[in-house]
Image (cartoon, coloured by chain):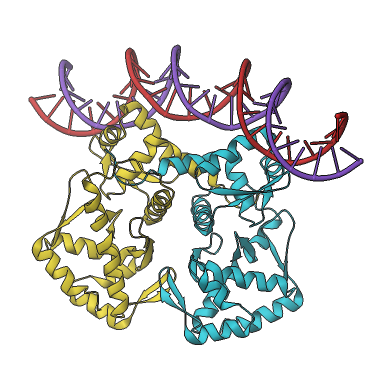
Chain colours: A yellow, B cyan, C purple, D red
Amino acid sequence: MKEGPDIAQIGALIGDPARANMLTALMSGKALTATELAGTAGITLQTASSHLSKLEAGGLIGQRKQGRHRYFTLSDDEVGLLLESLMGFAASRGFTRHRTGPKDPALRKARVCYNHLAGDYGVRMLDSLVAEEVIAGVGDDLALTEAGGEKMVALGIDLSALTKQRRPVCRTCLDWSERRSHLAGSLGEALLSMFLEKGWARREADSRAIHFTAAGEKAFSALFSESG
Amino acid sequence: MKEGPDIAQIGALIGDPARANMLTALMSGKALTATELAGTAGITLQTASSHLSKLEAGGLIGQRKQGRHRYFTLSDDEVGLLLESLMGFAASRGFTRHRTGPKDPALRKARVCYNHLAGDYGVRMLDSLVAEEVIAGVGDDLALTEAGGEKMVALGIDLSALTKQRRPVCRTCLDWSERRSHLAGSLGEALLSMFLEKGWARREADSRAIHFTAAGEKAFSALFSESG
DNA sequence: TTCATGCTTCGGTTAGCATCGAAGTATGAA
DNA sequence: TTCATACTTCGATGCTAACCGAAGCATGAA
């Protein structure tokens, strides 16, 4: 009689290179079709289909049909957090797949972590939010302060929509490149959406990298300065 | 050219049932021999040896020779944190290996998480430490307050020894049964050691469960009351 | 209806790896 | 030295699962 949950099954799900590549691609937060995922994994459509049904059975991904396409996404934030922490661990043990390519600095600066901002910018943002006492709490039990809520509303965040959701508004996510926490949760998602909508930043195609415009950099730094 | 660290390799390492069982056994924090680990995994010594060398090559475990024995342990806190978070995720997706056996409530109440206290008691302890402002901080960047440090010294904790180590003094670890954070890091380890040394609690054999004595319960509750 | 696209299912092949028996090495005890 | 214990290495086996070709199903366009 073994104790506790079975980590071998999820390990095995993530342990296959093709599946790991698909999951990493889905960390971009985009909904991708089976064909696209097969491409990034470098396998045929049949094989990809088999992998996708396994991942879905394991609760790691979900799909929604739209016409004759099937769009796959990670199931929820939890999966994103787990994958990001696995990446951090992998990096700490020297499991890398690349010879530190040209994309690498961009990824470390700012990238999508499923649905929120990660990398140097993500960590700096959380640091600033804490320093300004917009967010308070210990461990993963973060919460918006009252004054912080007002600031977010002033920024144009629809706070009531966020709090209605079942998932947490604020949550930490261990950044693999910075090895410190950045902000996840529905607020983290809303802030990234805001950056993109306001044109402060745009997503790179086929990558998790986020590129800030010059104006965006300025606005971001003004809002989330290091001094708080 | 794939981006980021390679999560497939660690996934594969953890994904084999025999290896997962060994790692889970090592979450007890005890140093175990190859023979013992082979027993818990239900495999022969040869097979276990092969698995152990793979885990060691992957940086998940380390060994120290002592006479003709080889004692294996998890490499460091990081591995423990990762495994615990994997257990939480596995539990959330319904990957369990047991029919909620009799040991289960004991594990959820108090157990070893590699080298610190987890379960209901672990979470309550961190809550109390935060409420009493012994510990402050956001996300994983926890720190002892000045007053908190004095309290720990009063309890008999050798604070200078803890701060000399390279690893963090305070750290959060996501509890798989409570789905909230408990205290890890060198302080978390020191506190658990103290409980065991003072006879407040003892470890169950062949299990991660921790059993508190009646006197221990009382002392623990007095120190870490919910009201703070 | 006819054709094209997107994806799944089936069947058969192949490769990798977990497994164990047997032999080899190292440490300690007698 | 001799034997026993603890573990590793080698070699062979067998099973699983990843993989793809081919066929089937569903949706949409013409």
Q: Nearer the viewer, residue B16 or A68?
A: B16
Q: Is residue A212 above or below residue A64?
A: below
Residue B175 on image: x %, y %? 53, 62
Q: Residue at x 49, y 57 (%)?
A: B78
Q: Nearer the viewer, residue A1 or B19?
A: B19
Residue B59 on image: x %, y %? 50, 47
Q: Is residue B148 above or below residue A80?
A: below
Residue C16 on image: x %, y %? 48, 27
Choose top left, top right, bottom left or bottom right for residue B112. bottom right
Is residue B93 visible to the viewer in this orientation of the structure? yes
Q: Nearer the viewer, residue B192 or B149?
A: B149
Choose top left, top right, bottom left or bottom right for residue A38. top left
Is residue B184 visible to the viewer in this orientation of the structure? no
- Image quadrant where one finds the C terminus of chain A: bottom left
Q: Residue at x 44, y 40 (%)?
A: B9
Q: Residue at x 17, y 71 (%)?
A: A221
Residue B172 on image: x %, y %? 48, 67
Q: Does B159 sit left or right of A98 as displayed?
A: right
Q: Is residue A77 above or below residue D1?
A: below
Choose top left, top right, bottom left or bottom right for residue B8. top left
Q: Residue at x 27, y 62 (%)?
A: A120
The number of discs equals 0
